[in-house]
Amino acid sequence: MRRPVTRVACAWCGLERNRVVQSGMPIWWCSDACKQASRRGSAASVSSASEGGQRAELGRDRRRRERLERLHAIFDRITPMTPLSYVDARLLMAELSGDKLWFLHPKTAYRAASRRWHPDVGGDAKVFRLLRAVTDTVERGAR
């Protein structure tokens, strides 16, 4: 006897997959990174039950997309002929790490930023490469 199969989507990223139907089927995540991200954002999902919460969530998504587009554009402008300036690298390091006093502990700031932007934990690969370029520029220092 064949068991019925249904199409389920990851609760965080929306990746779809076929699964066998079970009674009281729990929420499904495609990876541990999605599961952790959904738990970090659980307060937002509780407030999103109302219409105002949904609008706020859409605004956050839009701002995140715009920020990613801006960071991607910065990364695309970096070439051997037009390297990243030291001043811009310092500003970007503060933004990517989320710590305005990152220069007191640069390694700690880099680790915090890499935990936030690494592709394996739900970050963006291009922004992570930008973080690496920023770190290299900061380590070299002002010229």
Image (cartoon, rainbow, N blue to C red):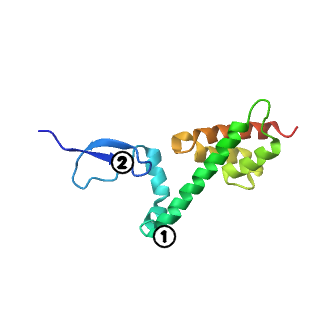
x then y, percent, for residue 77: 72, 38
Evaluate whether residue 52 shows in this view: yes
Mark 2 near mark 1, Cβ–Cβ under 8 Å?
A: no
x then y, percent, for residue 13: 44, 48
Disc 1 element: helix
x then y, percent, for residue 49: 41, 67
Question: Badge 1: few (under 14), some or many (20 or more) residues near its Cα, within 10 Å?
Answer: few
Q: Which residue does the numbered mark 1 point to in the structure image?
A: 52
Work out how far the residue at label 2 is from the one at label 1, CA to CA, in angstroms.
24 Å
Amino acid type, mark 1: Gly
In the picture, the quarter occupied by the N terminus is top left
**In-front residue for pair 42/2:** 2
**In-front residue for pair 116/7:** 7
Q: Which residue does the numbered mark 2 point to in the structure image?
A: 9
Left or right of 69 in this view: 61: left
User: For the residues carrying marks 2 and 1, which lies nearer the camera in this image?
Assistant: 1
Which residue is at a point 22% across and 49% down the rendered structure image? Answer: 22
In the current view of this chain or complex, which residue is farthest to the right?
Answer: 143
Which residue is at a point 69% across and 39% down the rendered structure image? Answer: 75
Disc 2 element: strand
x then y, percent, for residue 29: 39, 47
Amino acid type, mark 2: Ala
In the picture, the quarter occupied by the C terminus is top right
Q: How many marks?
A: 2
Left or right of 132 in this view: 12: left
Question: Badge 2: few (under 14), some or many (20 or more) residues near its Cα, within 10 Å?
Answer: some
Which residue is at a point 36% across and 43% down the rendered structure image? Answer: 16
**In-front residue for pair 72/24:** 72
